[in-house]
Image (spheres, rainbow, N blue to C red):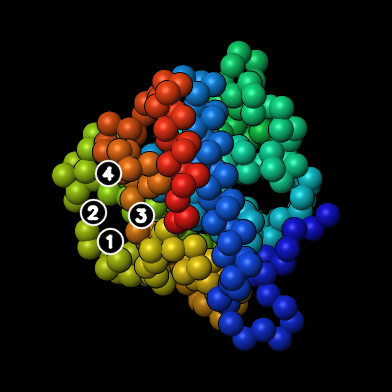
């Protein structure tokens, strides 16, 4: 079974803007991602809530609308590929993969337990749907470029998406990869920076200032876009347009401006929640707040 068209458009449509029904569906899926993240971290007793919450709308738009995928066929050769540098956010991806029937939903109930294929970071050798095993940040873009080069050389029809954290912009390998992608006109590559402003050690720009981020990427030869990463309509419209654009002669970068911990008020912009665990009563409160909001 093929998922809805990678653009969610009808033939002849002249706009990439999602309709109201699509927006409602994607908002619900973003809420689902947050709720399942709370549930899985409760199983593991530790995890990265806030890193998932800042990316939930982008995850929803990509996997439930923009990317070309087939339900139940994680290894389909024609699928769009996705790599993630901030692999600690994989706890938000695993519920999506189970929902898309890439693996049995029962796997989620054993998240991080001994013998489970689902760990704190994604492992492409064990988890159907994972295109890149990430742990140490800084490598995802280089890997995505390799996948994009393979697409070019084999003539297959797919796009490559890569999500990185803003703290990842402090890694030299990212910029070497950025130069290579621009030099080789990797127009089938779309990178995303989850610009939530925080990393493990605190505010990104206090640890090592990465601004002006947009000007840096343009100087490196990329087409750069910026979007409110929690505006599901804006995110979906932009990502649809970038995926459909076959005239672009350079790789594209999206700076997704987000709030770390978005959806649970006391986690928002609080670096202590980069890694943590809610006890049962606090988890219930977080679930109630997530359910009460439409982001």
Badge 1 density bin: few <14, some 14–19, many ≥20, Cα 10 Å: some
Query: With 92 as the anchor, is 13 left or right in this view?
Result: right
Q: Earlier in the sequence, mark 2 or mark 4?
A: 2
Front: mark 3 or 2: 3
The residue sitting at 59% across, 24% down in the picture is 111
Check residue 213 in the rendering and tell me which mark sits there, or answer none: 1
- Reading the image, the residue beneath label 3 is 258
Compute the Cα span from label 4 to label 1.
20 Å
Front: mark 2 or 4: 4
Query: With 70 as the anchor, is 29 left or right in this view?
Result: left
Badge 3 density bin: few <14, some 14–19, many ≥20, Cα 10 Å: many
- Reading the image, the residue beneath label 2 is 210
Considering the numbered disc 3 on the image, is that residue within a helix, a strand or a loop? loop
The residue sitting at 65% across, 15% down in the picture is 115
Badge 4 density bin: few <14, some 14–19, many ≥20, Cα 10 Å: many
The residue sitting at 78% across, 47% down in the picture is 73
The residue sitting at 36% across, 54% down in the picture is 258
Residue 33 position, x and y percent, is 55, 43
């Amino acid at each position: 079974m093929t998922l809805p068209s990678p653009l969610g458009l009808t033939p002849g449509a002249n706009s990439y803007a999602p309709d109201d029904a699509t927006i409602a569906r994607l908002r619900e899926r973003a809420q689902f991602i947050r709720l399942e993240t709370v549930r899985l971290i409760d199983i593991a007793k530790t995890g990265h809530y806030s890193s998932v919450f800042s990316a939930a709308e982008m995850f929803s738009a990509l996997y439930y609308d923009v990317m070309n995928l087939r339900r139940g066929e994680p290894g389909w050769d024609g699928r769009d590929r996705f790599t993630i540098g901030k692999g600690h956010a994989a706890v938000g991806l695993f519920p999506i993969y189970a929902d898309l029937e890439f693996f049995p939903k029962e796997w989620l109930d054993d998240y991080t337990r001994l013998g489970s294929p689902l760990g704190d970071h994604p492992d492409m050798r064990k988890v159907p749907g994972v295109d890149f095993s990430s742990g140490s940040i800084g490598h995802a873009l280089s890997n995505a470029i390799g996948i994009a080069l393979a697409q070019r050389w084999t003539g297959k029809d797919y796009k490559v998406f890569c999500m990185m954290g803003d703290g990842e912009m402090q890694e030299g390998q990212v910029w070497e990869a950025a130069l290579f992608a621009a030099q080789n006109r990797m127009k089938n590559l779309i990178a995303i920076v989850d610009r939530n402003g925080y990393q493990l050690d605190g505010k990104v720009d206090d640890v090592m200032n990465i601004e002006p981020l947009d000007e840096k990427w343009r100087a490196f030869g990329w087409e750069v876009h910026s979007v409110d990463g929690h505006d599901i309509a804006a995110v979906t419209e932009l990502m649809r347009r970038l995926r459909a654009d076959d005239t672009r002669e350079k790789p594209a970068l999206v700076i997704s401006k987000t709030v770390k911990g978005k959806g649970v008020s006391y986690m928002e912009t609080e670096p202590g929640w980069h890694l943590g665990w809610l006890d049962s009563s606090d988890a219930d409160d977080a679930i109630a707040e997530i359910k009460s909001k439409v982001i």
